[in-house]
Image (cartoon, rainbow, N blue to C red):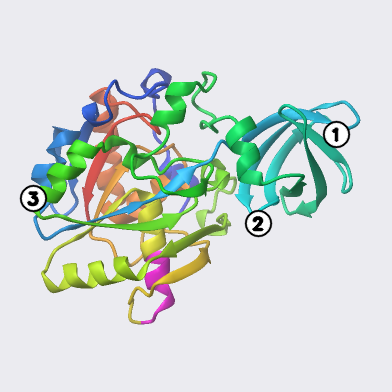
């Protein structure tokens, strides 16, 4: 497969710069992959489109205010984007500076918080903060909006670039399919009899890294940490027994479930935490997920490859052309799709 197979034209004005006035006010494009049928809907129609024995699986990761600005102890400006919190005081981070900081140098971040550069791990720097990393980020950090959102993060972004069920801090990008749900909509879904379960996958900044090779098979995925509770494994088993469908809310929930299923030869999902570099492209055999709620993804991205694998490349090309022609809003703050595998 060539990278050009996953390209499409997107007018820049269709990239959503701000969320809809209400979480549930987005549009929903329903693609039935078995027939290729496309249907324009409102996101609130998800209640009607889910079956009473279906199971919604969400990613309950919480976005941390991962971007810090400051200076090196030598005086030069520096910008830090925390990729992963390693323990109470250490983190891996991208560091932008006029000169690469060497091990032993100090960074003065925010209003005077000191972080020492311990060394490099591939493209990331290992930093040790003088106080708790999460405390520093909560007090001094900025919401790490994606690079295609151009405004300075504000208080509205702190609330809206976060799902209403976010619980476990550690993501530097939101699991954006979940941004469309609010508590009343979730209550309507539960009242219908739809099950609700969660996984945790801390989304890293690597989710925005472009694919730089023309031969897609040569691309190396970034690593992400996930955790699947036993309660979710049990809920999936009960759903299968009732002939219901497992509905992943977002590509990150899907990646966690499929990564766990891939560990076992028979495709069984086992509870626990692990790292994954799973790379899902057309031809992949899905083991865990039957339906996917997702936003629209960037051209030439690994996530566009994932949805092409899930619903079929031709179906996705037609759906994206339909969405562009219909003036859907794209990317993190944009509209959504419901894909039937």
Mark 2 and mark 3: Cα distance apart in space: 41 Å
Location of residue 323 (image quadrant): top left
* Disc nearest the viewer among 2 and 3: 2
The x and y percentages for residue 73 are 88, 32
Q: Residues within 10 Å of mark 2 (few under 14, many from 20)?
A: few
Instruction: Name the mark on residue 99.
Output: 1
What SS does tag 1 mark? loop
What SS does tag 2 mark? loop
Mark 3 and mark 1: Cα distance apart in space: 57 Å
Residue at figure coordinates x 29%, y 27% from the top left: 324
Q: Nearer the viewer, residue 114 or 21?
A: 114
The x and y percentages for residue 297 are 39, 39
Instruction: Name the mark on residue 206.
Output: none
Q: Residues within 10 Å of mark 1 (few under 14, many from 20)?
A: few
Q: Which quadrant is the N terminus positioned in?
A: bottom left
In the picture of the structure, the residue carrying the numbered disc 3 is 192
Instruction: Name the mark on residue 87.
Output: 2
Location of residue 18 (image quadrant): top left
Question: Which range is magenta?
Answer: 258-265
- Are dots 3 and 1 in contact, CB under 8 Å? no
Residue 203 visible in this rendered orientation of the protein: no
Q: Residues within 10 Å of mark 3 (few under 14, many from 20)?
A: some
- Are dots 2 and 3 in contact, CB under 8 Å? no
Location of residue 44 (image quadrant): top left
Is 213 covered by the magenta stretch?
no
Does 29 sit above or below residue 238?
A: above
- Are dots 2 and 1 in contact, CB under 8 Å? no
């Amino acid at each position: 497969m060539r990278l050009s197979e996953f390209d499409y034209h997107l007018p820049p004005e269709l990239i959503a710069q701000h969320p809809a006035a209400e979480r549930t006010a987005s549009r929903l494009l329903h693609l039935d992959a078995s027939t290729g049928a496309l249907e324009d809907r409102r996101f609130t129609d998800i209640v009607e489109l889910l079956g009473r024995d279906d199971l919604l699986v969400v990613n309950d990761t919480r976005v941390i205010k991962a971007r810090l600005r400051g200076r090196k102890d030598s005086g030069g400006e520096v910008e830090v984007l925390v990729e992963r919190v390693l323990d109470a005081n250490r983190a891996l981070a991208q560091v932008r500076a006029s000169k690469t900081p060497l091990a032993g140098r100090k960074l003065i971040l925010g209003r005077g918080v000191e972080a020492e550069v311990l060394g490099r791990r591939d493209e990331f720097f290992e930093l040790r903060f003088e106080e708790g990393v999460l405390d520093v980020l909560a007090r001094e950090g900025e919401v790490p909006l994606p690079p295609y959102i151009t405004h300075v993060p504000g208080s509205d972004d702190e609330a809206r670039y976060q799902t209403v069920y976010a619980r476990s801090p550690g993501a530097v990008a939101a699991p954006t399919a979940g941004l469309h749900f609010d508590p009343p909509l979730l209550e309507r879904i539960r009242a219908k009899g739809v099950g609700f379960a969660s996984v945790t996958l801390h989304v890293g900044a690597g989710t925005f890294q472009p694919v730089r090779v023309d031969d897609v098979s040569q691309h190396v995925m970034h690593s992400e940490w996930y955790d699947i509770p036993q309660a979710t494994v049990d809920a999936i088993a009960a759903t299968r027994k009732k002939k219901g469908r497992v509905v992943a809310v977002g590509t990150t929930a899907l990646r966690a479930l499929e990564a766990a299923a891939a560990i076992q030869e028979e495709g069984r999902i086992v509870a626990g935490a692990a790292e994954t570099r799973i790379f899902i492209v057309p031809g992949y055999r899905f083991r865990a997920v039957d339906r996917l709620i997702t936003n629209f993804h960037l051209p030439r991205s690994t996530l566009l490859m994932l949805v092409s694998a899930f619903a079929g490349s031709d179906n996705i090309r037609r759906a994206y052309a339909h969405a562009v022609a219909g003036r859907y809003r794209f990317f993190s703050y944009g509209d959504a799709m419901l894909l039937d595998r």
